[in-house]
Amino acid sequence: MDLKRMGNQTVVFANPPVILSSYSVVGPKEGQGPLGKTFSKVWKDQLNGEKSWEFAESKMLREALEGAIAQVNVPSGHIDFMLAGDLLNQMISSNFAARQLALPFIGIYGACSTMALGMALGSMLIDGGFARYVLVGVSSHHDTAERQFRAPTEHGTQRAMSAQWTVTGAGSVLLGQTGVGPRITSATLGRVVDYAESNVNNMGSAMAPAVADTILNHLHDLHRHPADYDLIASGDLGAVGLALAGEVLKQSGRDMGTGFTDCGVMIFDANQDVHAGASGCGCSAVVFAGNIMQRIKAGELKRVLLVGSGALHSSTSALQGESIPGIGHAVVIEA
Amino acid sequence: MDLKRMGNQTVVFANPPVILSSYSVVGPKEGQGPLGKTFSKVWKDQLNGEKSWEFAESKMLREALEGAIAQVNVPSGHIDFMLAGDLLNQMISSNFAARQLALPFIGIYGACSTMALGMALGSMLIDGGFARYVLVGVSSHHDTAERQFRAPTEHGTQRAMSAQWTVTGAGSVLLGQTGVGPRITSATLGRVVDYAESNVNNMGSAMAPAVADTILNHLHDLHRHPADYDLIASGDLGAVGLALAGEVLKQSGRDMGTGFTDCGVMIFDANQDVHAGASGCGCSAVVFAGNIMQRIKAGELKRVLLVGSGALHSSTSALQGESIPGIGHAVVIEA
């Protein structure tokens, strides 16, 4: 059997899976941002009738997953796997969403890189011959994340200028073996990289070296250059992390040019008071499912590299003095 | 392309991946149990020189992963993926172990079913043509789990008779495309099943319906009977859950006979004061990597069905009044 790999970390699909549909659900603040009109649905408040933020996050993920399914005429029983993950302890948003959908469920965790990880893994399951359709979705919620990782938002704690604003949003894609739509042609799965950043209010810096590592390996493995992509978008480095990743890449001989940006920079305006930008699993998921998918379909973008970025720490590891390891998972989407 | 599936939930491998090696590391209590001599390494205490139980758990997982690698002569750079997961918030044991190993890392979460999930997923990545070798490992630690999910062990809280004892243990397998060893021939990925059990001191009952659902689907998909297996072992149902799963299966027309047992029942003796048995990601991982692998290699077991069992809740979901959804992932191992 031929190995579907190039270089050290990149898999190349023999029959690239198709992104048949995508769906995004966001909170009011994301709806007011510059990408507001690109989202499938904007909630009026953070709870949407649920009794807790955690219940709301799981509902939001379910809406995103069901939204992606509703756009495609899938024969009953042909969605062979659901892949999902989120930031909450033991991934309850995903588990409870999976309970409703009752599909064979594979829980995945790459912190905020989970959407790209799911797209990569889902593509391998389809191209490997194990699935006809795979549903991938992730979520994050500003208030559940703040309460769990930092402080309850009711406290009104002052935020550092390097801090990022966790996106309230859930995004999903439905992948298929055949059909019409952009295709996932290759993926580069990342290694854990840790440059000893330990400031939990500066996640962008913690993740930047891992994103740079994955981009360098990706370009090396496929013998490509940054200019071979119309857009290279990291998941949620924010302004601080994006600048740092660009600097690391430049020092490694890769000038990224103007086509390198970050979903966490794109989703909010400077006047929305989010400081260094956005973060969260939902960030890259809703920007990809909305803005980027629309630009691919409109013919503006022919080849995109989406590099999910994840900070693999917990409150416990931070309190015990550990640094924050990062990871970057990349997928190539072509029109 | 032929679809490598049978029925609704089962994948069947065209070139079944080989379990080239397995390794298990456990704590002192597990070492004193009836399977004590089957483990690769027994720690003398719960910390093994680390400054916290969380650091110790991650070290234990690293030892298990490195132990599996050390037994096989793998060409440098040919371990294409590491799949790992654990019970701690944001899976820090796995993330920090992955930092040391520096392999392309896929984080997976199926609570205590994670070992079977990893073996299933790793097999798909190899049989799909995306990897030559895949390293799979999981861990749990009695004291980190008690502190996170229930109460710090220093409190000496009285435990319910239906409660299970989280195994301090890490298990791993190294899967390969070719080589000598037992093979993973098929896998049934589970759906989330919830019968509204909400007692966090009775996880076996919460997981039993999901395990039964997966076994029923597995047998149906492959047109098999319980007697087609020398051993069917659930992951960590414990005595209460195992009896309940047997009852559900019997009422569904499947009498499991004497070949149906549970890793959480096997690992401790009645006189070890663990009440309903053992639990934790590490439970099925170390029982499989030790006892079951040895019995397969000795020719005693020709065909085994390992059904990882996971309870997909969190402390937060329990406090907010949610029930405990369960999941079961099954893999078939043949001599």
Image: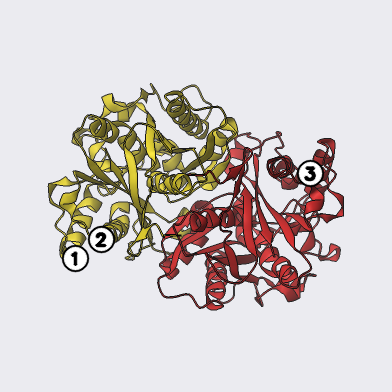
Chain colours: A yellow, B red
The answer to whether mark 2 and mark 1 are in CB contact below 8 A is: yes
Residue A286 % position (x, y): 34, 35
Q: Is B62 positioned to the left or the right of A307 in the image?
A: right
| Whether residue A257 is situated above or below residue B55 in the rendered picture | above
The C terminus of chain A lies in quadrant: top left
Instruction: Residue A216: give its label.
Output: 2
Give the residue number, with chain letter if any, for mark 1: A252
Where residue B232 appears, as percent x and y from the top left, is: 76, 54
- Measured in 3D between alpha carbons, the distance from the residue under mark 3 to the one under mark 2, in whole angstroms, is 50 Å
Quarter of the view holding residue B219: top right
Q: Hey, what amino acid is under mark 3? A: Ala
In space, the residues marked 3 and 1 are separated at their CA atoms by 56 Å
Residue B174's image quarter? bottom right
Pinpoint the chain carrying mark 2: A
Residue occupied by mark 3: B245
Can you say whether A151 is above or below A192 in the image? above
Helix, strand or loop at mark 1: loop
Task: Where is residue B269? Give x, y as percent.
Answer: 83, 65
Query: Can residue A308 be seen in this snapshot?
Result: no
Identify the amino acid type marked 1. Ser
The residue sitting at 39% across, 41% down in the picture is: A17
Question: Alpha-carbon distance for marks 2 and 1?
Answer: 8 Å
